[in-house]
Amino acid sequence: MFSITIRHVSLRLFEILFAILTLSSAACGVNIREQETPSPTAFIVTSTLAPTLTSRPSETPPPPPPSSLPTVAPVEGMTSTQVNVREEPSTAGNVLGIIPPNVRVEIVGKDPGENWWQILYPQVAGGKGWVTAQYITTASKPEVPIIGGVGADPDSGTVAIIQQKINIRSGPGTGFNSIGTLNPQDAVNLTGKDANGTWLQIDFGSGPEGKGWISAAFVQANGVEDLPIVTDAGVIVGTGTPTRIPLTPTPTIVPAWEDNDSPTNPIMNVTFEPTGTHISIYNGDVSAPEGDAQDWVQFTPYSQTVLLEVSCKGSDLDIEVLQNGLAIQQMEAIHCGSKLVVHAEPNLPVQIRFSAQSDGSLNYISYTLQLKTIP
């Protein structure tokens, strides 16, 4: 009985569905060819199993981000005079800015020769710059890493490492004007050479067309044979034969660079303070009868007594100490390693004049001055 009812309902539903399709086809203008009445089909109910969930493979968690490299703790220093901040550890580097005297700086690196400190300098892209170490006073020797910079590898073929203090000249020869100096371990970019390979052209922002010339005898450099030959006028005329520039064991003495300092424009000016700077160190050079014959250094003490110590290489120096235009102390032939106690009036500038002695031949003296206030 139940089976007959199901079949009857199924047939009735089929007829209703067929009628609806016929009307829809007529309304749409579609001709449907009449088929024989199909025999009714019984509904078959089957059980459906619940879908089986396929477990996804577990994802491997990403490795933790690498820990950041340890940062160098900056070492505090203070400028003893106005200093240039340069792009590279060399006086040939571009000047990024100027820091006045008695300004605190944070040291984070040094060059291989320890002549330059790398400092934090947020005013420029990269946030760092280089200053001359001799103008920065610190409580102790900064323990900071060596930063190679552009000049760490003289084998690169475009870099030279300076072996001793030398002049930068406007052309390839001692007859050209001195336009700057380089210190030992300074790194410079090489851009050319003269026809003999005895002079090298370097990038030097203060020179004519941004170039300067240095003697090849005082540098360490490889790959010089690949440098272009440049004339005095700056014209490239080709390249030379492969040569390696030897380091001269006994370099020729060159005159000290004219720094144009004077009593009213001293090359160093430092102010000592009870809670600030107590010690100042300056490296300089003088020569006679050629080159820079005098250096003027100025300091302002807060106490009545200052210890002056001079070490030097070469001949002896003449030194004079003045305050208010009057000589406090005048000594001739100060020997290397000499110490001098200066008594001066506090809070007034004191000037020191260094002079090179001359006997007719070129006399070059490099010196280091250390000033220390005595409470």
Image (tube, helix red, strand yellow):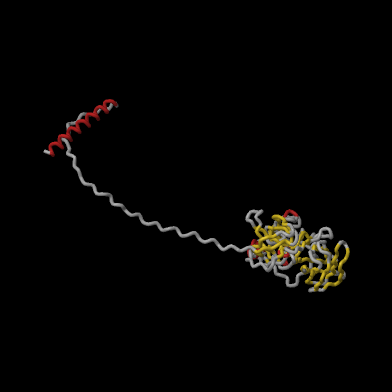
Quadrant of the rendering where the C terminus is positioned:
bottom right
Residue 268: image location, x then y, percent: 78, 62
271 sits left or right of 188 in the view: right
Quadrant of the rendering where the N terminus is positioned:
top left
Residue 278: image location, x then y, percent: 74, 66
357 sits left or right of 209 in the view: right
63 sits left or right of 135 in the view: left
Q: Residue furthest right?
A: 326
Instruction: Name which quarter of the figure residue 245 lies in.
Output: bottom right
Instruction: Name which quarter of the figure residue 61 lies in.
Output: bottom left
Total tally of numbered discs in the picture: 0
Residue 72 can be seen, yes or no: yes
Residue 163: image location, x then y, percent: 71, 68
The vertical placement of 68 against 315, above or below, is above
- Asked whether 316 or 193 is in front, the reply is 316
Residue 292 can be seen, yes or no: no
* Residue found 75% across the figure and 55% down from its top: 208
* Residue found 23% across the figure and 47% down from its top: 48
- Asked whether 273 or 182 is in front, the reply is 273
Instruction: Name which quarter of the figure residue 86 lies in.
Output: bottom right
- Asked whether 157 or 373 is in front, the reply is 373
Residue 279: image location, x then y, percent: 74, 67
211 sits left or right of 5 in the view: right
* Residue found 66% across the figure and 57% down from its top: 121
The vertical placement of 341 against 192, above or below, is below
